[in-house]
Image (cartoon, rainbow, N blue to C red):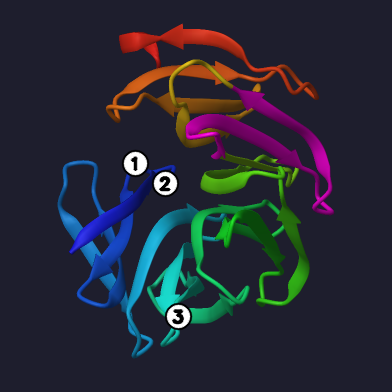
Amino acid sequence: SYAGDATVENDGNVYTTGNSGSNINVVRLTSAGIILSTWTYDSGQSDAAWALSLDTAGNVYAAGQTFNGANNDFRFVKFTSTGGVALTRNYNGGGTDIAWGAGAAADGTIVVGGTSGSDWRLIKYTSTGAVVWSRSYDSGLLDAMTALAVDAAGNAYAVGYHDDSGNYDAKTVKFDLSGNVVWASTHATPASEIPRGVAVDASGARLLWSGPDGRLTRSVRPPPESGAPRLVATGGDAL
């Protein structure tokens, strides 16, 4: 068993998601670490969740992967506030597809994103699981997504990296409510740069980077509607 993601709700309780055996698990804990409930989704296949999001109604969204017999597809599961499975959705791009991010918007829609082959794939669903749009992002290089967040207006911020001749450059892309690219930014240094997370607050998006050793090295906040992140903290002050 392992945890793929965690998030905190307004009352301080913590949700984690991951897998137990071949099933997706969601665990709700108090701020003191006491387990309040455990929910399981079993598709009969090998499933894992790497991303978690909550909406204002208390629904919980887990996204990750499921094995289709040949390779992996996106797996997206919506749980009600009491742990019932409200809906599930898959995406099969024809190759290996793994969802690494999920973000719930205030209007009840949910954006799920991840890596599909060598490109990014983002899919926006209604609260009942209908596809609003599905978008691919291709930088022209080998692309991988690592995280996704949605702001109060419903814009999606996706982060990841692309392989530039064996060196990983960090990539950040903002998508609007219709799935159009607002801006795209690349952050390159002589070393590999792999962003591990993205969070959005009233001031915009904060992007968290880790170095080649996996330790958090800095965070940056892109100026509004620009594609050029600026450094705001390094080292131990990165959060």
| Secondary structure predominantly adopted by residues drawn in magenta | strand
Residue 15 appears in the figure: no
User: Which residue, given by chain and number where applicable, does mark 2 sit on?
Assistant: 9
Question: In front: 44, or 118?
Answer: 118
Question: Residue 140, relative to residue 122: is it above or below?
Answer: above
Q: Quadrant of the N terminus?
A: bottom left
Give x and y (percent) for residue 80: 47, 72
- Mark 3 or mark 2, which is nearer the start of the sequence? 2
**Magenta-drawn segment:** 161-187
User: Which residue, given by chain and number where applicable, does mark 3 sit on?
Assistant: 85
The kind of secondary structure element at disc 2 is loop
Q: Do the residues under discs 1 and 2 have CB atoms within 8 angstroms?
A: yes
Find the distance from the CA under tag 1 to the CA under tag 3. 23 Å
User: Which residue, given by chain and number where applicable, does mark 1 sit on?
Assistant: 12
Q: Do the residues under discs 1 and 3 have CB atoms within 8 angstroms?
A: no
Q: Is residue 165 left or right of residue 62?
A: right
User: How many neighbours does mark 2 have within 10 angstroms: few (below 14), some (14-19), or many (20 or more)?
Assistant: some
Question: In front: 223, or 166?
Answer: 166
User: How many neighbours does mark 1 have within 10 angstroms: few (below 14), some (14-19), or many (20 or more)?
Assistant: few
Q: Residue at x 33, y 59 (%)?
A: 17
